Image (cartoon, helix red, strand yellow):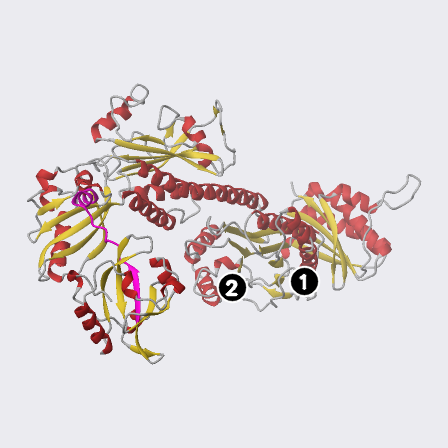
Amino acid sequence: MEPARESDTAATPVGAADLFDASTDAAAVISQDGTVFGWTRGAEALLGYSAPEMVGTRAGRLLATPEDPGRVSGVAERCRAGSGWSGTIRVRHRDGHRFEVQLRISAAFRMGGRECFLVSAREQHEQWTMAQSVLDGFLTRSPVGMAVLDRDLRYVWLNDTLERLSGVPREERLGRRLSELLPGLQGEALEKLMRKVLATGVPVTDYEYAGWVWADPHRRHAYSSSFFPLLDADDTVTGICYMVLDVTERWAARRILAMVNEAGTSIGTTLDVLRTAEELADFAVPRFADFVAVDLLESVLSREDHGTWLSDAGPVPGRPAMRRAALRSVREGCPEAVHRVGDLIGFRSPPHDARTLVRGDPLFIPFLGAEQGPWVAAEPPRAERVREFGMHSLISVPVRARNTALGVATFVRTTNPVPFASDDVLLARELVARAAVCLDNARRYTREHTAALTLQRSLLPTALSGGTALDVASSYLPADPTGGVGGDWFDVIPLSGARVGLVVGDVVGHGIGAAASMGRLRTAVQTLADMELPPDELLAHLDDLVLRLGGEEAVSDARGTAAFTGATCLYAVYDPVTRRCAMARAGHPPPVVVPPDGPAHFPEIPAGPPLGLGGMAFEATEIELAEHSLLGLYTNGLIQGCDDVERGMARLTEALTRTEPDLERLCTAVVDDLVRRPQPDDIALLLTRTHALGAGHVVSWDVPDDPSAVGEFRALAARQVTEWGLGELAMTTELLVSELVTNAIRYAAPPIRLRLLRDARLTCEVADASSTAPRLRHARSTDEGGRGLFLVAQLSLRWGARYTGDGKIIWAEQKIP
């Protein structure tokens, strides 16, 4: 066996795992005299000899150099000692070419009574060496900037890439420090970081920073750098090497994303169009621009929906232009602005070109000049502002959302010397797009809120009158725009016999649907009140109506309209003759009563279920009110503004006990005291001060069940009317009394009673014990009777019947001249 070449005689021990890893090596088993006992396929592939050709032959014939018996003996002794051996030898292939292999010989072992060795070999490939020219090319042409600095942080070497990135020639860099060459690049901070690397020996990787360099002084660049120390043979730090990569695009993308995310929390916090425009301007100054103006179409600022008036062909002639909605500047008072907030701005040259609005493409002027600006001829004051305040870069972005043009946002830089770049245009578009959605949402909500409020106000009473029975004052406050218009309502309904019906209610929900439902309920209450129903029966009929309306929910949902969800209500009837007030409530807060000489209190009235539940009865309660008592009806929004409902009711009683003779001023003061801004729900308050009809306004007689007595009561009624100074109504009153009393005697049951009341109108009432409803019919020309109620209807302003616990009352009213 041939030993290693002279240059390879330094053998090294190998581990057992390496010696017996024959998975890829050529392997053979050779006895101590050099005879081949075993031959693998790897050996056949490496040397070209098959196993039959080699087994039993001498291995020495494979060597390309003469054998050295002394060295062979030394290797054998080393392997017998159990250490193994490895080295490089030169061998000959079967085809004759020679090559070097890495040879490994295992420790000796016995096989078939002979001492053997396992020999493995693999071809020795020459290691590739890098020429100096290749290394120089790698260092100078690498896309990564590289430099070497000494311990004083002075440049010793740099590659061409770093020279191009910085714009500083190599000759000017060598021997100088970073902070001396690039003051706009955070040089002192970078040198501090490098000193730390020199002191600790710990590398720093991917450190990002931003700044300006001479290669591109008009644009801010971002860089990612890594620093590591340079060591000599004694591990002594001799300097520092750093590598730098331009990551401006990545940095700009992250900056845009971060700013847009931040804008999402700052823009659109309210559903107010003007406030949203202000939030866009506030956010952009000064972090993005030095001056921002947001101009919106008048149709956007209007509370009425006129629709979009822009098309691909341009603006429709005669349509309104834009108004300034927001203005912000780094200078106090925004002196750069030609137009102030609220001013009308017509379409002119850019940045207010109608085509810009329609197409949605931003206008980008990186270097703005007052002399060549497109508005110089059209608007000289604007050119003067550009010149005076140094406006040097501009981006104007159309505000568009859902294919609708809303306006234009203009960003200008003045004090910031860096002009806008292309990535700033992208950022401006993202900011405006975010704001545009918020503006459109606010616009849509404002119009819906206005429509609901208009509908609600149109359904509420425009004037309230309690006649001679009550002094009336009311206050209604719609919810703030963020809360949505609710369905609160109130009403004062004149009833027969100088009585007055009072109602207050609250429909569940907000928006146009709640306002429409409120109108339906108010109409229903007026209709039921005209039927002279007592409070509990009126609420029962109203509950049936709400149940029927709620049954339409499936149809309403299918058509996309609002479904009725329920309501609360309180209904009261005050009689100034008896000073009695009957009331019932359906899940509504109780009324408050303030007697003229006593503390305020809440009458104990059964709460009753809210309207729309069905299956539960309502109970009426009747109380007596002293003359000049204060009665207050309200919705829950008035008392829920406090910490809790009980506290709100207590504060309400305190507010109503103040000395204030004027009912209107008292109503306003109570609302101002109790309402907390912003208010999430509608608020309605109805205040009344009671009066009584004394003996001078009411007279009554018991009528015997005798037709002959009709003439006597006709005369009594005519005399009483004349004494009240209403002589011109005496004849009509005689006819009404004659017909009503005659019908009661003829068709009803005693006892019969006649009553005359004088308040805002003259009322004639006839009460009897029968519950038979009167019926108005048209008599034929041949009929001798049947014209009584027809005459009553013709002679009176209005007439009707109401039922009592003892029977019914038929009444007729005349207008007092």
Q: Which residue is mark 2?
A: 595
Q: Position of residue 464 (x, y in %)?
A: 57, 47
Q: Which mark is residue 501?
A: none
Residue 428: within the magenta? no
Quick one: label 1, few (<14), some, or many (20+) residues within 10 Å? many
Residue at 36% x, 57% y is 48
Which residues are the magenta region?
118-139
Q: Does 364 sit left or right of 389 as displayed? A: right
Residue positioned most to the bottom: 113
* Of marks 2 and 1, the one in the foreground: 1
Residue 137: within the magenta? yes
Secondary structure at numbered mark 2:
loop
Instruction: For the N terminus, give its image quadrant.
Output: bottom left
Q: Position of residue 460 (x, y in %)?
A: 57, 47
Secondary structure at numbered mark 1:
helix
Q: Position of residue 790 (x, y in %)?
A: 81, 44
700 vs 269, nearest the viewer: 269
Residue positioned most to the right: 782
203 vs 61, nearest the viewer: 61
Q: Amino acid at mark 1?
A: Asp
Q: Amino acid at mark 2?
A: Pro
Residue at 71% x, 57% y is 700
